[in-house]
Image: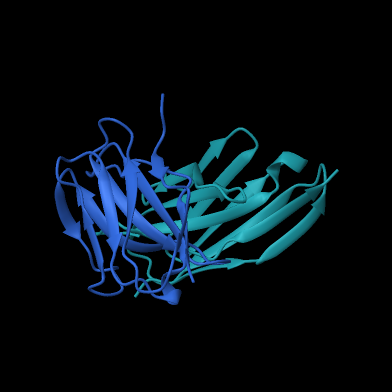
Chain colours: A blue, B cyan
Amino acid sequence: GAGVSQSPRYKVAKRGQDVALRCDPISGHVSLFWYQQALGQGPEFLTYFQNEAQLDKSGLPSDRFFAERPEGSVSTLKIQRTQQEDSAVYLCASSLASGELGSPLHFGNGTRLTVT
Amino acid sequence: KQEVTQIPAALSVPEGENLVLNCSFTDSAIYNLQWFRQDPGKGLTSLLLIQSSQREQTSGRLNASLDKSSGRSTLYIAASQPGDSATYLCAVRDTGFQKLVFGTGTRLLVSP
């Protein structure tokens, strides 16, 4: 079956522009996560959804970052007034359940954002 | 605050060797620990997930162990192959949280 799909694959933005990154999770997956991965680093948590509810946004670095999942499936990460430090790979991941057993996460290939 | 460290940062071995990758974490109150593989320009592929009540998990040539009390996990790769070349990431999920905290990874190169 299809995995987690992210688009666009690459995005170049001029500083100050707004960008929107899309994530299509695996069908039926309840949990959805966004992570930011800087070059040579491990991913860092941004935000978490359980269905359409955003239950944890503690990792969003500033109020320029906004994420939504209005119907509990597709999610969009929006970055307003992009800055050079926003350049990174943005990874989306989904899992089947949010509950007790901690289902494995399935990651998309990411969106590489370059802010010039 | 949970911190995850992976040693070594990079490792180069000839094909056929057995090898061990190390992961340590500062807060032992974890819910589970997961090992991932990341190929260049790709997302992460889950290799093994160990629940906090478990001591190890095995999948093919891979074996991961967990010593929660000492804050350590190891990933053992038997009979390494060039196709094993990738970055290996360790991540922990703390009890009461959904998010994963990742280490910075070990870059593995297996030469033919």
Tell me residue B31's x, y (percent): 32, 54
**Residue B92, how many percent across, how many down?**
40, 58
**Residue drawn 32% across the image and 40% down it:** A95
Image side of residue B41 versus residue A68, left or right: right
- Is residue B98 at least partly visible in the picture? no
Residue A115 relative to residue B20: left or right: left
Q: Is residue A40 left or right of residue B101?
A: right
Residue plotted at (65% across, 67% down)? B9
Q: Which residue is drawn at 29% across and 36% down?
A: A96
Using the image as rendered, state which of residue A18 and residue B17 is in the foreground.
A18
Residue at the top extreme of this rendering: A1
**Residue B109 shows up from this direction:** yes
Residue B29 locus on image (x, y percent): 32, 64
Residue B100 in the image: x percent, y percent?
A: 37, 58
Q: Is A16 located above or below residue A113 in the figure?
A: below
Q: Viewer-proximal residue, B4 or A43?
A: A43
* Quadrant housing the N terminus of chain A: top left
Looking at the rendered structure, the number of numbered marks drawn on it comes to: 0
